[in-house]
Image (tube, helix red, strand yellow):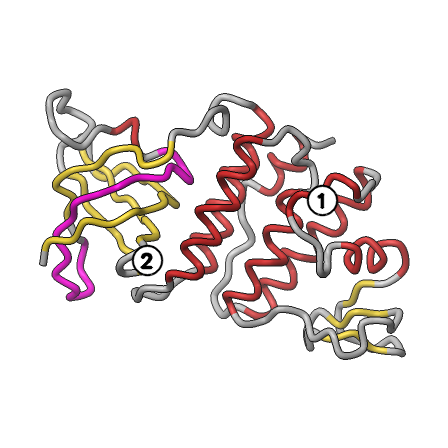
Amino acid sequence: MQVTTKAIVLTSIKYGDTSLIVRIYTESDGLKSYLLRGILASKKGKVKKALFHPLSQLEIVANHRNKGSLESIKEAKIHYHYQNVHNNMVKNAMALFLAEMLANSIHEEESNKELFRFLEASLQWMDIHTEISNFHLYFLLLLTKYLGFYPDLEKVDAPYFDLLEGEFISTTSLNPMLHGENISYFKSFLGINFDAISTIKMRKKNRQELLQSLVLYYELHLQGFRRPKSLAVLNEVFS
């Protein structure tokens, strides 16, 4: 079946000498993997290698057989032109990290238009704003709403957050948890919007510790989740 859909690139891996395998989150069918034959050798085709940077927002015309095998793309073009995500060092490092987090978190081959709209709008917000040092923290927290493990806020005033149970608790336990300064920062992200994230002033140490805890939160709640290799690069950029 031929489908025209908006799509967000997650990963791109070289296959053989001239081809790519790309994983893309589509508005129409969720996560899809495509084999782009000969794309590294051809300069005349309708599908160009330069389109497939991590988090690029495209419109694609694709053949979906939906048999669990690699699909094919007939045409592709930019749907949203980023102003500086891919040529700003900080934003590019953040894009690589978030693309890897998404690739390790999303596995469903079915349409989820709410999730797609969230990804589309939030990445466009990152593109046009300059104060983004907290963006990845808030993005990852909001993403848990769509993945099914957003924090239980029933006891939000409690001094500890149990990462394994996903809830605030009054007394410490043996589970990994947030406490002290970092739980205060964590709580400050609850119930705000992207425009407010620049008002949260954090030291680099706390930002890195909170990010490590959020990545652990994903590890604890998503089966098969792999810690992103680009995390070290992102921490280096913000060090």
- Identify the secondary structure beneath mark 1: helix
Q: What's under tag 2, amino acid-wise?
A: Leu
- Between 3 and 183, which is closer to the camera in this rendering? 3
Q: Residue at x 67, y 37 (%)?
A: 235
Q: Quadrant of the C terminus?
A: top right
Q: What's under tag 1, amino acid-wise?
A: Ile
Q: Is residue 27 above or below residue 57?
A: below
Front label number (1 vs 2): 1
**What residue did someone put label 2 on?**
31
On screen, residue 50 versus residue 145, left or right, reads: left
Percent position of residue 210, x then y: 74, 52
On screen, residue 239 versus residue 104, left or right, reads: right
Residue 6 belongs to the span the image colors magenta: no
- Identify the secondary structure beneath mark 2: strand
Percent position of residue 49, x then y: 25, 29
Q: Is residue 175 above or below residue 112?
A: below
Q: Residue at x 51, y 51 (%)?
A: 101
Q: Quadrant of residue 82?
A: top left
- Between 238 and 187, which is closer to the camera in this rendering? 187
- Between 34 and 187, which is closer to the camera in this rendering? 187
Is there a contact, CB below 8 Å, between mark 1 and mark 2? no
User: Which portion, as a residue range, is magenta?
Assistant: 53-70
**What residue did someone put label 1 on?**
197
Q: Residue at x 22, y 43 (%)?
A: 60
